[in-house]
Amino acid sequence: MQSFFGLSNKMPTFATEGLKEIITSKTKLKEVMKKSLFIMVVVAGSLAISSCVSKKDLENCQNENRSLTQSYQSTREQLAAANSRINSLMEQLSACESNNAALQNNLEKSLANSSSNNVNIAKLVDQIDESNKYIRHLVEVKSKSDSLNLVLTNNLTRSLSKEDLKDVDIQVLKGVVYISLSDKMLYKSGSYEISDAADATLSKIAKIITDYKDYDVLIEGNTDDVPIAQANIRNNWDLSCLRASSVVQALQKKYGVDPKRLTAGGRGEYNPIADNTTASGKAKNRRTQIIITPKLDEFMNLIGKAPKE
């Protein structure tokens, strides 16, 4: 590869001109030295035969000798100046060659870095592709889950009327069904006994539970934070558990749900879904949840029933 400025193949113009100047000076110096040597021989011979040479010829020889001596001295000075000039040019040439080598080294490093950057960019593109695939997978899973939840919700609510749905809230999260029943619909005021008005709704919920016979069912009681004031009930823990037990026994005895599938539990006031500082918030917290959990094989069957779109 030829370097940036061509210094490795061609000497700069200023260096070439300096060399020509030195060569010319040296040639002149040699000519002057030859002439001086000749004059000196002539002078020496003249002195030896001074009796045979006229005074005028001797003066002419001396004048010419002085002239040649001066020319010789001037040529030597020019040669010294030319040598100094060439030294300066050689230093400049060396500096240019060093600079050229540094630039060429930087170019090679830049090319190497560019190649490395191209490799890194390729890896980054691959990582982005993998991330996009994972995101698409999550979207597909979410879509499938939403479809499954929709199937379950439709199957559960088809047995309930609009009037029933005012006091019944049904949600499906990750294949688990949460049926929330308000206390005013289920129980007599300040009691854990099932009211007559709850029979119609409980019978429909029992039908849903019976349809999904392979599901496990948890009945969970919840209260607000107002302490219970009854002699036979110690606190809200007792009240929530007693209410859940009342629903379990009603499902078993009145509607024929297999008791092996049922579990009763209470969470007292410690699982609120609304602010207990307002009347509406307290009403939302006084609830009984029926949590229907599919077993794995049934869950897979439901996934197969979920619509693709």
Image (spheres, grey):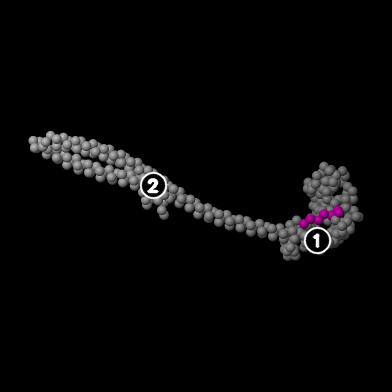
Left or right side of 289 for 132? left
Which residue is the site of mark 2?
97
How far across and down, in percent of the image, does residue 288 sit? 82, 52
User: Residue at (39%, 49%) from the top-left corner?
Assistant: 7
> Does the segment drawn in magenta span residue 27?
no
Q: Could you tell me the amino acid type at mark 1?
A: Asn
User: Residue at (48%, 52%) from the top-left corner?
Assistant: 111
User: Residue at (69%, 58%) from the top-left corner?
Assistant: 139
* Residue 63 seen in the figure: yes
Left or right side of 24 for 286? right
Left or right side of 56 for 90? right
Q: Could you tell me the amino acid type at mark 2?
A: Glu
Counting other residues with Cα less than 10 Å from the Cα at mark 1, is it few (<14), some (14-19), or many (20 or more)?
few
Which residue is the site of mark 1?
154
User: Which image quadrant: the C terminus?
Assistant: bottom right
Q: What stretch of residues is rendered in magenta? A: 166-172
Q: Is residue 145 above or below residue 81?
A: below
Q: Earlier in the sequence, mark 1 or mark 2?
A: 2
How far across and down, in percent of the image, does residue 76 sit? 26, 39
Q: Is residue 277 above or below residue 143?
A: above
How far across and down, in percent of the image, does residue 299 sit? 74, 62
Q: Is residue 162 above or below residue 13?
A: below
Q: Is residue 10 above or below residue 309?
A: above
Quarter occupied by residue 140: bottom right
User: Residue at (66%, 59%) from the top-left corner?
Assistant: 137
Label 1 vs label 2, nearer the camera: 2
